[in-house]
Amino acid sequence: MKTLSRPGAALLVTSVLWCAVWAGSAAAAPPAEVLNVQFSDSSTLSWDATVTAQDYNVYRGLLRDLQVGNPPRCHVDEVVGTSVVSSAAPEVGEVYVYLLSAENATDEEGTLGTDSDAVERESLGKCDAVMFHHVLQRLGYGWSEWGRDRLQTLGFTAYRDEQLDPLTIDESGDSRAQLWTRWDPPVNEGYLQYRLLDESIYSLRQLQHHTTEFWFNHFNTEFRKVYDNTPGAAADRNLRTAQMQQREMDAFRDLAFYGSFREILEASALSAAMILYLDTNINTKDRPNENHARELMELHSMGVDNGYTEADVQELSRVLTGWNVCNKALADIDNPTAPCIANDAAGQRATNFRSNEHDTGQKILFAGTAYETIIPDTSGNPADGINDIQLALDTIADHPATKEFIATKLLRRFIVEDPTPQMVQGVVDAWTLHNGDNREILRAVLSEANVLNPDFVGQKLKTPWEQGVTGYRATRGLLQSFIAPFLRNWINRMGQLPFRNPIPTGYSESGGDWLGTNAQLDRQDYGMDIVLNASYAQEINLMVSEYSLTTDEEIVDFFADVLFGGQMTPFERQVALDYLNTDDSGVPSPYTDERVRETVGFMMGFKQFLEQ
Amino acid sequence: MKDHCADCSRRAFLHKSGLTLAGLGAASLIPTPLVRQAMAANEDKRLLFIFLRGGNDAVNTLIPHGDSAYNAVNRPTLYVPPGDAIDLGNGFASLHPALDDLKKVFDDGDLAAIHRVGYQNMSRSHFSGQRIWENGDPTQPTFLFEGWLYRYMREEGLDLNASLPALTAPNGGVLMRGVPPYHVNVRNPDQFDYTYEPPRSDKFKQSWRDVYSQLPHGTKYRDALQASEIQLLDTLDEYAAWDHTNWNPTDPNTGEYLFPVSAATNPADPSGPGGRKFAAAFYPFFNALKVCVLSLLEGDGLNGTRIAGTELTGFDNHENQGQLAGVHRDRLNVLGYGIRSVQIALSGVATNEPRGYSSIWENTMAVTMSEFGRTSRENGSFGTDHGGSTCVFAAGGPVNGGVYNADGSNWANGDIFAHDNRDLETITDYRAVFWEILRDHMGALPANADTVFPSYSSLSLSELGLIGT
C-alpha cells in the first residue's frame, strides 16, 4: 500500500491511493488492476494504461468511511484515456480515497485490487450499474424490465431521444401500458389520480409522464376549488370538474414535447381549471382580483420578485379581467367567444371571454425596463380585449427571468437540486436557440453531462409520489383495480396526492421539504405494506423464479440492483442477508416466499431507496 | 461552516465543560455558579406556536374600530360593526366576535394582542413570506434552510439528552427545520407507529437501526436521513406511552372537550355545522394542537419536550371571506377556542383528566404568526388580497397582557392604509417579538441574538416588553 499526498493542495487536503500489485491469474478478460494511480498535478488524477482496457471507472470516498467498511462510490464513469480531472477538495479534516478499475471492450469491469490483508476491494455498486439505474431514474420513475432492456439496446443518447419523442414509442402491444384507458373518460377525481398512477407505473413513455407531472405540479390546480366553483348536483360537478382537469392534463402532456413554453403557459393560464382555481372568473373590470396575476408571474413564469413589481401584478390582473368559465357545447369548448349554454345542458365547462367585463384601458407591463410592453387601449373595439393576454404572455414567456426560473426548476427536478449557473445557462441558451421549444429545453436539461454525472447520483430525495411509483415499478407491482385505492391511500399518507394540493406553489421540488421523522416512518411503512400485501406482492416471488434466483445472495443482490443500482455497503448487504435468513425473532431459518418479500420491503427502507 | 459566537453559545459551553445536562445529576451535586446559571436560564420554559397559513386578515381579527377608515365603504361585506365585536377596553381595538374564547384569556391578563407586526418591504408571496417568518431572515427568503427556532435550540443545546425535545404536527414546517433535526414530526397523532407489530416490527426496527447507524457519506441528505431514522426509532416507545388517543380533557366550566377531534368530542351547537360547534374539517387541527399540548405536559422539564407547534390553514381568503359568518370567522373561532383550551389544559385545571398533570402555564408561551396581513380594502370578490403586516397573539402565564400597537396614541386615523394606500405599515418587527420571547421567556442568552436572527443587534429594532417580571 502506498500513500500519496496530493501535491499543491494545501495543508488541509490529503488524498490516499491504494496501489497494491494485483496478484490474480493471467486470464485475458476482465482487465487487470489499474496501476500507478497518482495525482500528476493538484487536480489531475492519472494512471498507467491497463492491457485490454477500453475505459476506466473512478471511485471516490472518504477515508473515514472506508475505515468502517463503507467503500467509495462512483465518481467518474467511463474515462477514456489515463487521466481525469478531479479538482474538488474534501472538507476540512476529511481525506478522499480513490479507487480505479478498468473495463474491456465488452464492458467487463476489472478488479479494484486487494487491500493489505489480501482482501478484494469493493466499491459502493459498480459504476455501470449505478449509472444505468440513475438514467432510468432521471428519465422516468426508475427501473422496470422494459426500460432496462430498451436502455441496454439503445444506449443513453438514443434512449433519451426516443423518450423525448414519446409518440414514436409504440405501446399498443403492451397491455399494462394500456391500463390507464380504464380511467378514460374520467368521471371524478379518483379517475384522474388512478390514471396518473397507471401511466406513471406502466407507460413505456416514462419521460412523458414524468414531465407531465412536472408541468401539472408547476401549474398547480386543485380539484376541490374547481369543484366548488362548478354548479350542479354532485355527480355532475364531479364529472365536469374531472373533464376540466383532464383537458388541462392533456394539454400539458401534449405540449411538454410538442409545443413551446409560451404555449404551455397559455394552456395553463387560460385553462378553465386555472381560471377557477386562481379566481380569474371573479376578476372583473370593476372588481379586480389579483390572485392569478401574481401567481402567473411569481410561480408560473418569472419566479418570486424576479423582474416584476407590484404594479405589474396589478396591470396583469387588469389584463385578465373578463375571463371566466361557463358551459359550452362540445364543439365550442376551445372557443372563448362561443355562446354559453345552460349549466345542465350537454357540454363541458369551458373558458369564456366577456368583453363587457374586461378592463379596456391601456396596460403597461415592466414599465421603464428593457421589456416594457404596452397593451393598447381597446375601448374603441372591446372585443379586441381578448388579445391582451396574448400580448402579455408573449412578453412574459420571453422574459429572461422566465427562462432562468424555469430552467432552474427543470434542472432541480430532473438533475440536481442546486444546479450551477453554467448548467442553467446551458438550458437558457437552448431555450433561446430553439425559440422556447419545450422538447429542446428538456433535451438540454437532460444533456449527457447533466444526466451522466455520477456525482449527482443520490443527491435528490424522492418525493412521496416518486417513492410510491418507483417502489411499485421496481417490484413489478400489478396495479389491479382493487389495489389502486391502496396505493393512492399510501401516497396520500406520504403527503403528495395529485389534484389535492390547495397551495398554488405545487408540491416542493426540494428534498429538504420532504424530510422528517414522520416522512421516514411513512416511507418505510409503505415499503413493508406493499410487499406484505399478498394479492399484489406475489410478483416478487414470480421474479425470483423467473430470474432463477436460487440463493440468498442472488436474491439480495438482484433486488439491490433493481432498487438502487446495486449501491449497497457490505454491511448493508449482510444485514439484508440476515434479514432474509432469520425469522421474526431473529432465529436462523430457511427463507420463505413471504420472507423474500419482506426483505425486499426492508430494503425499500434503506437510505439509497429514499434518495435518487 | 459559519461559526456564530461559538464561545458564548450555551451548547459550546456545555460541550467544552465536558458536561451534558443529564450528566449534571448526581455526579455534580454542587454545580458551579456558572453551570447553575446556564441551566437555570431556560429550565422548564416551554413554547408553543401556531402558524396561520395563507395570510391572516389582521384588520378583521384585531379590529381597529378607532380608525374611521375601517368602515362599510372600504369593506362592504366584511365590515364588523362595533356592536358585534368584542371591545378590548382601550377605546380603540376590538376582537372579531368569533374570538370570544380568546377574550377569556385576555381577561385573565394572559394575552398580548399585538397589531402591525411584520418587517420592512414585506413579501406578498405566500412562499417567501412563510419562509421569512420561519427562517428569521427577510434577506434570504429562499436560501436560508434553517428555521430560527432551530438555531435557538442548537445554540442553547435544547436537544441535548432529550429524546423528544420538540414536536410538530401535522407538518414539519421550516421554523424548526435543520440538520440534524431536533424535532419530531407527527403527521397523524393517532397513528404514529409502523403498521406491523412485534415481533416482526422489533426485527425490522432493529435492522434499520443497524443500517442507519453506519451510513456512507457522499449524498446531500445523508445526515438528515440518518438523524431522522434514529430519532424516529428512539421516539416511538415514549410516544406510545403518552396514549394520545385516550386523552380527552374537558373544560371545568362548560364540560366541553378541549380538543374536538371527532363527532363525539365536538360540542353541541344548534347553529353550527351538523348541530356541532366545529366543522369536521377542523378535527385534524385540534388533534395536532392536542398532541402539542400533551407533549409539553408529558415533558419533565429539562429532558422533555420544550417546544411544540402546529398550523391552521385556509386564511388566503381572496373571495367570500365573510363577516360574522364564513371561512374567516370559522378559523378565528377555532383559533380562539384552541388557545383557550391550551390555557386550560396547561393550567392543570382540566376535568376528565385522570393523569393529574400539574400546571405549566406559568412557564409557557403560545404564539401565533402568519406570513402577511391582507389589503385593508375589500377586493371585488368579497375577499381581500395579499397585504402587509399582520397581528400576533402571544398568550401565556408570563406575558404582560394587553393590546399593543393599536390605540389612539400610536394609530392615526386612516392608518389602515398607511402602507402604499393599501394595507398596514409595520410598527414592530416580527423578529423583535420572537426574540423578546426567546430571551426573556425561554432564557436565550442575549449573545445568541444575531445567530438566531441574523444581524439582529445591528437592526436596532424596538421591542415591546412582552414578558412580565
Image (cartoon, coloured by chain):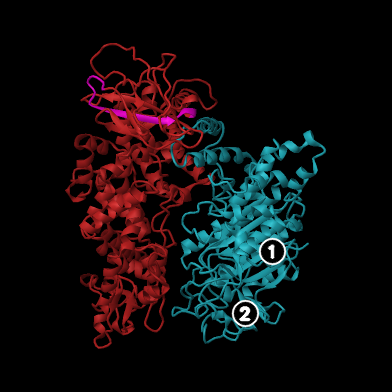
Chain colours: A red, B cyan
Magenta-colored span: A49-64
Q: Is residue A312 magenta?
A: no
Residues at marks 1 and 2, CA–CA distance in whole angstroms: 20 Å
Residue plotted at (60% across, 64% down): B430
Kind of residue sitting beneath label 2: Pro
Tell me: A38 left or right of B132.
left
Q: In which quarter of the view is residue A461 placed?
A: top left
Q: Which of the labelled discs sits on residue B426, or is there none?
A: none
Pointer 1 residue: B395
Pointer 2 residue: B64
Mark 2 Cα within 10 Å, few/some/many (few <14, many 20+)?
A: many
Residue A388 on image: x %, y %: 28, 76
Q: Chain of mark 1?
A: B
Q: Is residue A104 above or below residue A509?
A: above
In-front residue for pair B68/B42:
B42
Give yes or no for contact between labels 1 and 2 (Cβ–Cβ under 8 Å).
Answer: no
Q: Is residue B144 above or below residue A392?
A: above
- Residue B256 in sight here: no
Q: Are marks 1 and 2 on the same chain?
A: yes
Residue A512 on image: x %, y %: 47, 48
